[in-house]
Amino acid sequence: MSIESATAFYERIVSDEAFKTQYQNAVSDDERREIVLAAGYNFTPQEWEAAMTQISESSDEELSDAELTAVSGGSSVLSSKPPKWPIAYPLYGRPIS
């Protein structure tokens, strides 16, 4: 297990479309782990994070479209409690009662 292995895995995912597709099409985390191990990579989640930190710190160039797609995602700022319905919004400066 090593940071070098995690870095090599990242480089392959970015450059080898067939390998990336195989990895993305895995239906479970266990299947993804098997693909990674079968390809000769072995690293811990902590080593993966360290490798990503090193890669991001050493790169001064902008991300390519493929890299942006790989890291894009979404998040929600909603609290864990659902809002009360109906939600009342102020209308033209009127306070919500």
Image (spheres, rainbow, N blue to C red):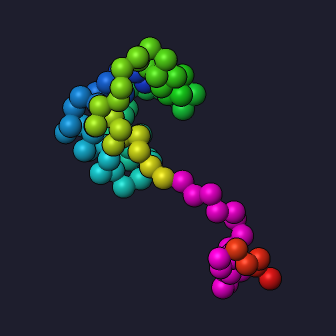
The image quadrant of residue 66 is: top left
Give the total number of marks visible in the rendering. Answer: 0
Vertical comparison of 64 with 25: above or below: above
Q: Pick the residue in front: 37 or 57.
A: 57
Q: Pick the residue in front: 11 or 95.
A: 95
Residue 91 in percent (x, y) is at 65, 79
* Direction right: furthest residue: 97
Residue 55 in percent (x, y) is at 44, 20
Image side of residue 40 versus residue 30, left or right: left
Q: Quadrant of the C terminus?
A: bottom right
The residue segment tinted magenta is 75-92
**Which residue is found at the position 44% from the left and 14% from the top?**
58
Q: Pick the residue in front: 13 or 27.
A: 13
Q: Main secondary structure of the magenta part?
A: loop
* Direction front: furthest residue: 92
**Which residue is found at the position 53% from the left and 28% from the top?**
49
Residue 12 in percent (x, y) is at 28, 27
Image side of residue 96 versus residue 66, left or right: right
Vertical comparison of 82 with 57: above or below: below
Vertical comparison of 42 with 21: above or below: above
Residue 16 in percent (x, y) is at 22, 32
**Which residue is found at the position 35% from the left and 38% from the top?**
68
**Can I make out residue 40 in this image?**
no
The image quadrant of residue 75 is: bottom right
* 78 drawn magenta: yes
* Direction bottom: furthest residue: 86
**Can I make out residue 93 in this image?**
yes
